[in-house]
Structures are given as structure tokens and as C-alpha cells.
């Protein structure tokens, strides 16, 4: 009455070099491995969170070639030759302006969705340094926050844009690149 | 939007020099949270660990004929398969230990754990779990609580004294039947709610290992480390002290981590196999595996006198407890008590039952029975006001609890009754924000509830499709009451240890208290309380809270109680340590204080008489919605949320709790439709279970904070974190009624339900219809 389940056949591993946060990581991976699992389990970058594993929640958001993407919906082997940035790759000696804004605006409670929210906003500000409120809301609408800190997250997005604008003004427009990358 | 504070400092309490109470310093974990460095249970690993995977039943009710682990054990990497026979004492539970760690002979719900596979890799564990061959004989499924008590229904837990009746509560005062027979206006309606899933983002996870000294350490998340320890130790047959529960960063809880889930599995595997182990549930396992908010069916009859005073209430509540007790007994007691909301009712007959079924177990969820009970109570109040042509605020003002009023249980309310004050503050603010025609002392005569639409009529459904399609706005208001702290005689206490260090003067302090910070910010609040009492900067106060062996028992992060009870314990321990300081030449003193608030009592089983609670929180919310009759979609445009918090220890944290609570309440009211059929969960992922996003939450959420000092809380503080969930659902129902003229009685208010209600509504009209008892009954539907 029960169907017999056979174990899956072993799949040959595939070599891949992931470019993550400015470093190259040669890995041998099953082709089915998601970028999310590769980041967390193979590279130990646990700031990218695994929540729904099917593109519902946005907690696994990373930048791939500058665009915010759900790492749970990407296969790691498809990410060779692409630049991947995780929450660990933001900021340096100082916090990224978005991280700074999240602290100032109290834009989290449990903090579990925070890395994904920050990465979504990073992609927004890189593309639109002076976003409208609607663009900020749209940027994080794919990032669930069950604690419901949304309004402070939106405030943080606005504040981050202001911080970056100030920094650009201080730099006197010498550097046309978005900061923080 | 800043928080509006209407209250004042407690008289006689001089501000501390640095006034750390009442300020909002940055959260201490901010850096770790924004950099991704914070470690949550799913991020943990131990050298040499095995990976665990639990085999879930996947069927709601079946006899286990056999478990064949051989195919799993033959798979490369699989090390062990544990079953019920491996559990030293195979029972656990928060209130009653009726639940097995691993199923023994029978499975009673789809999420029941049947076997536990341990393997060298996570992939091997997953495959191993699929290869465990469990042979079942399916049994008849008890899926409907309405029929679960009928004679001949199969028993969910055979051997219980009352069959499928888990618990029953009766509260009687005066003569409800007589009062209703003599009342000028009587309304009756039935309300239903469905399950709500906590949907905390970090699924159940953790690691466990055995120390060289023989102690089992489980590092995970939860809401009460010391009770987790008690329960886990009991399953292993070990003394409490041989188990250590450590909390990593906690990725949301909301009541959903009160019950044990993966903790006893982790401990069992580590103890049995003597290897470090790790376990992470996936989202569907989490959706199946922890208790939900109770679905309830509530039938209510309310009657008022000719002078607009509530005379009597008869109400009957049935809650689906699912397969195991969890906290159902306590939830149903709380819900039954709150079937009359925050209203003085001289004659009550309240009846509540929790019924065992083969559905997913139900337990604690922020609000703990209060949201369901007050969906019914506040809807009845709004409908009564409408029926007698009264203003919803004026009717409430006339009938709300005052200081010294009796509860349905026949004893006076605890001091500090903020029902009226929160309502009036909310109504006044709502009038300013939404242009609503309430003047805080009743509706302005002749004013439409929503002036921007004055004069517009809603055409009858179906007669004018174009006009019907125009979105319409409406405003609703509702009150809420919720016990803060444990109830009905459940032992209530918190213990704190304060260590002071310095040469001459106190220079720094360490506070030890096992209180769980689930994101609400209680760790910061407790440090603020200590720093204020010690006149020290916040940075000089360290907190040890996340290890059951290093900090004393604070009780759970639940019932909005930690600021009140744990905060008071810290406050008193600080005072005790300070008192010792001048009398010692040491450079260190230590004091431990256990705070016990005024005692509560169980209710008399016949009359329901007793002292159920020592503290209540009061709230009122006004909600503006836009209803699109063409689609049935309801959008929340603005919320005023008024709360009496006693004293705002950390105003920004309170603001966060209000906004976050409103977001969860919005999901509960409009989106979150957890479904089961024949014992199977249909909403197994977030594809099917919709959660509020940034675009669903309104721009305008106005937290309104009143500070009527609580006699017991530290600096007068009381709890508040659950209250935003309490009035919201009936406030939205009232707003929808204001917009399109129909009363919704089944939560959630999905577009389909709004459309059906509009279709069913004969001659829907913007005019206030005056229902009579005969026409307003929902029993036929």
C-alpha cells in the first residue's frame, strides 16, 4: 500500500567559481544547489537568511550584478561569472548608509528579515539615488517583515537616501559612482 | 510620525539624572542585526555535528502498524533512526504533558513527529527521512469541532475523562436569560474565526550537544528557557539542572514558540547518539508543526435597556484545540472571560469549550483568545448602538468598565481601569485624522461618519453595477481589554539577580534574568530599568538573559508580561542590591529578588466566580478603510491605536509594538486565511498563506500612549504588546459596515466574503438600517 521510495542517484558535482563580495570562491557543487545554500553552507555567509526557500519572503535577497535577487530561486552554477554581494559585503570600516539608517530609524524588531531588506534598498539606491517614497515601498514589497516594522523600514530607506546625498555633496560630485560598493 | 503621549509622570517619582526610563536609546543588538552577524538558530553549527530530519506523519489520524528504518539506514551517511522506543519519557506539554516526542502507535495530526533521522549531511538526513517506511492504517478523522462531541465520534485521545471535550468554562452572574427576556433591544449573531499562523521568519531550528560534565545543551529559540528546560529534561528523564537551554537570536515568536517543537528532538538525538546535532525545519514543516491561533465559533446574544445600558449577555464559544492540549485550556478560559469585552454587564451567562480534533493543535498567539472573543463582543456593541440609533462612541462611553466595576467573575477589576480614557483619546484623535463625526463625547448630530462622502448613497447591489463599483470609505472604532500576566491561579513570578561592582561608588552592574527578547526589545527595557534605579549610564549595566544555567527564571515572553513582572523583579533587585552596598567593604554585592504580583485564583467550576487576573491592558483603535465593491478588496488607509501603558519605559519600542501589532492584526483581518480540510493543511506555504507586505500597511498609523500608572509595574509600567491585536478586527468590521453597509461575521474579511456579503444584503443602503432581533440573526447563514 505504500509506494517504495528509492534513494536519489548521486549527481556528478560541477566546478563553479562564485564571485562573492569581491573574492573568488572555487566550489564543487551539485547542479541543484541554490545560490542561497551555497552562500550559507559552502561559504558560511549566514547573514543571507533561509525562510521560505521559494521566493515568497525576500529574506535571502542578494545583489547579483547589482540587481536585487532572491538567492533561493537561483542555482549556484548559474551564478558563475556574476558578481554576488551579500549583507556581509556591505560597508567596510564604517556601516553602509542603509545599515546606518536602519539603526537610526529602529527599522527592525527581531532582525531576521533585515539583511534582505537592506539588500533590496541597496539595489534601489544604486539605481535611483533619489527615490520617491513609492519607489522605496516598491523596492521592499518583496521582503516580508512579520514583526511589522514596515513603516520604520520605509523611513530608513528615505533616511539612507538622504545620508548618501549628503555624502555625495561632501565629495563635491568628484565621484559619480554610488557609494558603498 | 512621533508618538503622542498624553500621560504624566507618576507623582512623587523624581526623574533620574540620566532619565534612562522614558527614553529610546538604540537597540544594543543593532550592529549585529544590520550587518548579518547576528546568529539565529538556523545559523548555528557544531564541529562534527550530525544533521537531523524529522519524519512527519503527513496524515491526520492513523494507527502506526510498523516503522521500518532499514531502507533509511542503508542509505550512505545515515547514522541512526530514532523512534518512540528511544525516548526515555515520551510525553511533554506546556500545561499538560499529553504530547509524545515521537508518535507512539498512533498519529493524531499531520504534523506529528514519527521518527527522527540522523545523518552525516543534511541531504542524507532528508533522503533518509523519505526512506523510513512507516506503515499506517488510517482511522476516521475528527475535523469539525461542531460535531466532535456527538456520541459515536471517534476519540482523538482515548482515555480522557471527557472524550473530545478538552475543557469547559462557565461564568454566570445575575440572570442573563431573564435580563434578555426583559431587554428593550436584543441582538443575536454568530461569529467565526479561522487559524492564524505565526509565520515567524526563522523556522524552528537549533543545535544540541552533550558537555563533558554530562549536561545536555540545546541552543535554539523559544519564549521561556526555564520551562523549555523543564519539559526537555522530563522527556529525557534527567534532572532539570542537567539540561541547559540557550537562546540564540530569536527570529520572531508571537506565541508560536511557547510550545516545544524541535527542542526535545535535538536533545534526544544529542543524548542518545552522543554527537552534536543540528536540525532546521523548512517552511512547510513549520506551517504544520507548531500550534496556531484557535479557530472559534462564537454565538452571542446581547440585550440593552431603553436607556442604552447593556442588561445581559449570553455567549457560547467553541474553540478547535486540535490534537493536543497545548495552552488551549488557558486560552479558552481567557476568551470566555472576555466574551463581554470591557463592558459592565450585570447579567451574564458565558460558556466556553475547547474541543479535541485531528486538526493542527492550537495554542498561544499574541492576544491569547482576546481577539476572537472581542471580535464578537465589539461587533455586538457596534450593532446594538446602531440598532438603538446611538453613536458607537457614546454607547461605549455609557457602558465601558469604570474603576471598581465587577468583572463577570463577580470580583472587582484590578486598579487602573483605562477603558474609557483610551476610547476617548482614540475617538478625539480619529476625528482629527479622519474627519469622523465623533466629537469624543458622541457623534455630532446629523454628521455622516465619513464627510467626504456625505450625501452619497450606496445603490442596491445588482441594481446599478456602475455605482456599486465605486470604492467607498468608512471608519470604525472598537475597544479592547486583555489580561497582562498569567491568569486563573497559574503561578506568576519572576526572579532577578543584580550584581554591583565598584570601589566606593557603584560603577557597573550585571543583571541576570532569564527573559527572552523575541524582538520586542525587553532586554533593553530591563537594562533601562536597572540603569535608572542605579543612576548609571546604560552602558554600565550588563544583562545575562539567554542561558537557563546563568540566569534565574523570569517566566515566559508572553501575556505582555515581561516589562511588568520581570521589570519589577529587576527594579526590586536593584533596590535590594543598592541597600546592601553601603554596608559592605567588598567591591561586589549581589541581591536576588523574586517578584510575585497579587495572586489570582481559578474560577469556581459552577459559577465561574474568582479573581482571574491582577492586571489588564486597555486599548481602543479607529480604522479608516476603503472598500472596493467591484472586487471586495478592503484597504486600510489609517489607524489610530490608543494604549494605556502605565509608563512608557522605552517609547520607541512601544511605538514599534503598536505598528507591528497593527500589521499582524491587518493580516488577521484581511489576508491570512489558514485552511484545513479533513485534517489536512491546505495552506502549506506562503504561496497560499498571504502575509501583509509594506504596501498593505497604511502610511498613517498613529500610536497614542496614555500613562495611568499601574500599582505593581516598575515605574508604573504595564504591558501592551498584545493589545494592538485586540480591537482591530471588529474596528475593521465596523469600518466596512460604515463604508458599504454590511456586517461581516467571518474572519478573515477576504474579497470573496465582502462580495458575498454585498450580494446577500437586500437593499444595501448608506442609511443606517435598524436591525431587529429577527432580521439581525446570522444563525441561518
Image (spheres, coloured by chain):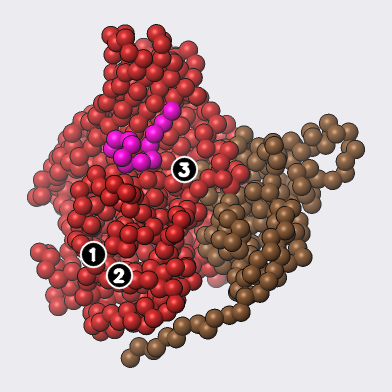
Chain colours: A brown, B red
User: Mark 1 near mark 2, Cβ–Cβ under 8 Å?
Assistant: yes
User: Mark 1 near mark 3, Cβ–Cβ under 8 Å?
Assistant: no
Q: Is residue B698 visible?
A: no
Majority secondary structure of the magenta segment? Answer: loop
Q: Is residue B230 visible?
A: yes
Whether the magenta-drawn stretch holds residue B551 is answered as: yes
User: Which of the two residues, A149 or B547, is positioned nearer the viewer here?
Assistant: B547
Q: Is residue B29 left or right of residue B518?
A: right
Q: Chain of mark 2?
A: B
Which residue position is annotated with label 1? B87
Label 1 Cα neighbours within 10 Å, binned few <14 / some 14-19 / many ≥20: many
Q: Give residue B58's position: percent from left, percent from top.
A: 36, 75
> Which stretch did the figure color magenta?
B542-553
Q: Chain of mark 3?
A: B
Q: Give residue B778's position: percent from left, percent from top.
A: 33, 64
Which residue position is annotated with label 2? B82
The alpha-carbon separation of the residues under discs 1 and 2 comes to 8 Å
Q: Secondary structure at mark 1?
A: loop
Amino acid at each position: 500500500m505504500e509506494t517504495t521510495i528509492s534513494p536519489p542517484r548521486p549527481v556528478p558535482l560541477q566546478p563553479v567559481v562564485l564571485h562573492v563580495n569581491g573574492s573568488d570562491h572555487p566550489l564543487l557543487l551539485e547542479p541543484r544547489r541554490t545560490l542561497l545554500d551555497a552562500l550559507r553552507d559552502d561559504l558560511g555567509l549566514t547573514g543571507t537568511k533561509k525562510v521560505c526557500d521559494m521566493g515568497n519572503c525576500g529574506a535571502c535577497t542578494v545583489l547579483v550584478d547589482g540587481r536585487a535577487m532572491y538567492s533561493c530561486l537561483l542555482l549556484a552554477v548559474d551564478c558563475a561569472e556574476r558578481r554576488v554581494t551579500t549583507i556581509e559585503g556591505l560597508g567596510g570600516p564604517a556601516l553602509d548608509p542603509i545599515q546606518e539608517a536602519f539603526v537610526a530609524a529602529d527599522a527592525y524588531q527581531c532582525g531576521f528579515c533585515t539583511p534582505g531588506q537592506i539588500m533590496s534598498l541597496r539595489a534601489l539606491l544604486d539605481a535611483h539615488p533619489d527615490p520617491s517614497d513609492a519607489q522605496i515601498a516598491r523596492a521592499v514589497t518583496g521582503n516580508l517583515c512579520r514583526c511589522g516594522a514596515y513603516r520604520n523600514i520605509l523611513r530608513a530607506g528615505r533616511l539612507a537616501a538622504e545620508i548618501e546625498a549628503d555624502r555625495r555633496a561632501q565629495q563635491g560630485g568628484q565621484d559619480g559612482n554610488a557609494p558603498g560598493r | 510620525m512621533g508618538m503622542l503621549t498624553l500621560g504624566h509622570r507618576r507623582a512623587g517619582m523624581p526623574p533620574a539624572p540620566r532619565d534612562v526610563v522614558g527614553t529610546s536609546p538604540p537597540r544594543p543588538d543593532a550592529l549585529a542585526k544590520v550587518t548579518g552577524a547576528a546568529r539565529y538558530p538556523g545559523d548555528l553549527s557544531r564541529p562534527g555535528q550530525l544533521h537531523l530530519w524529522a519524519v512527519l506523519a503527513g496524515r491526520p489520524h492513523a494507527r502506526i502498524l510498523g516503522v521500518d528504518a532499514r531502507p533509511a539506514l542503508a542509505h550512505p551517511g545515515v547514522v541512526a533512526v530514532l523512534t518512540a522506543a528511544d525516548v526515555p519519557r515520551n510525553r511533554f506539554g506546556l500545561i499538560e504533558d499529553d504530547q509524545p516526542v515521537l508518535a507512539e502507535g498512533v498519529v493524531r495530526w499531520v504534523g506529528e513527529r514519527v521518527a527522527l533521522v540522523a545523518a552525516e549531511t543534511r541531504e542524507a538526513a532528508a533522503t533518509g527521512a523519505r526512506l523510513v517506511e512507516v506503515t499506517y492504517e488510517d482511522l476516521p478523522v475528527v475535523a469539525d469541532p461542531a460535531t466532535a462531541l456527538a456520541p459515536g465520534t471517534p476519540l482523538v485521545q482515548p482515555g480522557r475523562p471527557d472524550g473530545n471535550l478538552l475543557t469547559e468554562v462557565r461564568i454566570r452572574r445575575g440572570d442573563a436569560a431573564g435580563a434578555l427576556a426583559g431587554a428593550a433591544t436584543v441582538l443575536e449573531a454568530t461569529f467565526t474565526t479561522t487559524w492564524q499562523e505565526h509565520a515567524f521568519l526563522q523556522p524552528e531550528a537549533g543545535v544540541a550537544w552533550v558537555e563533558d560534565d554530562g549536561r545536555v545543551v540545546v541552543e535554539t529559540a523559544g519564549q521561556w528557557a526555564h520551562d523549555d528546560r523543564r519539559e526537555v529534561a522530563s522527556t529525557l528523564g534527567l534532572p532539570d539542572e542537567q539540561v541547559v537551554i540557550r537562546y540564540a537570536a530569536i527570529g520572531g515568536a508571537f506565541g508560536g514558540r511557547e510550545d516545544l517543537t524541535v527542542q526535545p528532538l535535538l536533545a534526544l538525538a544529542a543524548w542518545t547518539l552522543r554527537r552534536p546535532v543540528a536540525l532546521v525545519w523548512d517552511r512547510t514543516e513549520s506551517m504544520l508543526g507548531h500550534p496556531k491561533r484557535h479557530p472559534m465559533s462564537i454565538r452571542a446574544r446581547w440585550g440593552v435597556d431603553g436607556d442604552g445600558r447593556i442588561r445581559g449577555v449570553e455567549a457560547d464559544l467553541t474553540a478547535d484545540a486540535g490534537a493536543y492540549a497545548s495552552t488551549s485550556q488557558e486560552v479558552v478560559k481567557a476568551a470566555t472571560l472576555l466574551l463581554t469585552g470591557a463592558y459592565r454587564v450585570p447579567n451574564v451567562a458565558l460558556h466556553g469549550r475547547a474541543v479535541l480534533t485531528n486538526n493542527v493543535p492550537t495554542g498561544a498567539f499574541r492576544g491569547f483568545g482576546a481577539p476572537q472573543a472581542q471580535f464578537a463582543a465589539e461587533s455586538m456593541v457596534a450593532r446594538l448602538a446602531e440598532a438603538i440609533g446611538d453613536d458607537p462612541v457614546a454607547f461605549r462611553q455609557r457602558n465601558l468598565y469604570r474603576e471598581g466595576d465587577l468583572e463577570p467573575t463577580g470580583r472587582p477589576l484590578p486598579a487602573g481601569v483605562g477603558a474609557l480614557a483610551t476610547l476617548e483619546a482614540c475617538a478625539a484623535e480619529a476625528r482629527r485624522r479622519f474627519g469622523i463625526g465623533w466629537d469624543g463625547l458622541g457623534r455630532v448630530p446629523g454628521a455622516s461618519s465619513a464627510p467626504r462622502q456625505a450625501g452619497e448613497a450606496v445603490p442596491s447591489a445588482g441594481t446599478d453595477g456602475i455605482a456599486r463599483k465605486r470604492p467607498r470609505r468608512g471608519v470604525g472604532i472598537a475597544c479592547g481589554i486583555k489580561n497582562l500576566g498569567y491568569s486563573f491561579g497559574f503561578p506568576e513570578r519572576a526572579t532577578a539577580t543584580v550584581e554591583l561592582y565598584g570601589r566606593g561608588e557603584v560603577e557597573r552592574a550585571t543583571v541576570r534574568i532569564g527573559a527572552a527578547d523575541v524582538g520586542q526589545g525587553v532586554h533593553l527595557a530591563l537594562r533601562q530599568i536597572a540603569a535608572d534605579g542605579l543612576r548609571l549610564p546604560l552602558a554600565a549595566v550588563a544583562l545575562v538573559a539567554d542561558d537557563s544555567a546563568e540566569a534565574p527564571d523570569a517566566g515566559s515572553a508572553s501575556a505582555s508580561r515581561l516589562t511588568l513582572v520581570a521589570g519589577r523583579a529587576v527594579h526590586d533587585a536593584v533596590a535590594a542590591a543598592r541597600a546592601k552596598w553601603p554596608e559592605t567593604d567588598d567591591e561586589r554585592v549581589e541581591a536576588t529578588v523574586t517578584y510575585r504580583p497579587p495572586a489570582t485564583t481559578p474560577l469556581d467550576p459552577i459559577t465561574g466566580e474568582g479573581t482571574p487576573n491582577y492586571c489588564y491592558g486597555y486599548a481602543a483603535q479607529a480604522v479608516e478603510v476603503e472598500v472596493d465593491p467591484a472586487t471586495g478588496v478592503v484597504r486600510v488607509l489609517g489607524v489610530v491605536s490608543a494604549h494605556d501603558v502605565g509608563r512608557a519605559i522605552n517609547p520607541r519600542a512601544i511605538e514599534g509594538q503598536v505598528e507591528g501589532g497593527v500589521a499582524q492584526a491587518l493580516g488577521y483581518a484581511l489576508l491570512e486565511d489558514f485552511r484545513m480540510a479533513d485534517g489536512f493543511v491546505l495552506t502549506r506555504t506562503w504561496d497560499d498563506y498571504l502575509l501583509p507586505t509594506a504596501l498593505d500597511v497604511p502610511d498613517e498609523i498613529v500610536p497614542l500612549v496614555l500613562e495611568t500608572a499601574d500599582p505593581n509595574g516598575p515605574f508604573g509600567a504595564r504591558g501592551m504588546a498584545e493589545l494592538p491585536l485586540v480591537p482591530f478586527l471588529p474596528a475593521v468590521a465596523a469600518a466596512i459596515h460604515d463604508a458599504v453597509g454590511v456586517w461581516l461575521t467571518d474572519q478573515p474579511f477576504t474579497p470573496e466574503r465582502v462580495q458575498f456579503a454585498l450580494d446577500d444584503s437586500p437593499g444595501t443602503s448608506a442609511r443606517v438600517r435598524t436591525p431587529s432581533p429577527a432580521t439581525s440573526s446570522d444563525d441561518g447563514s
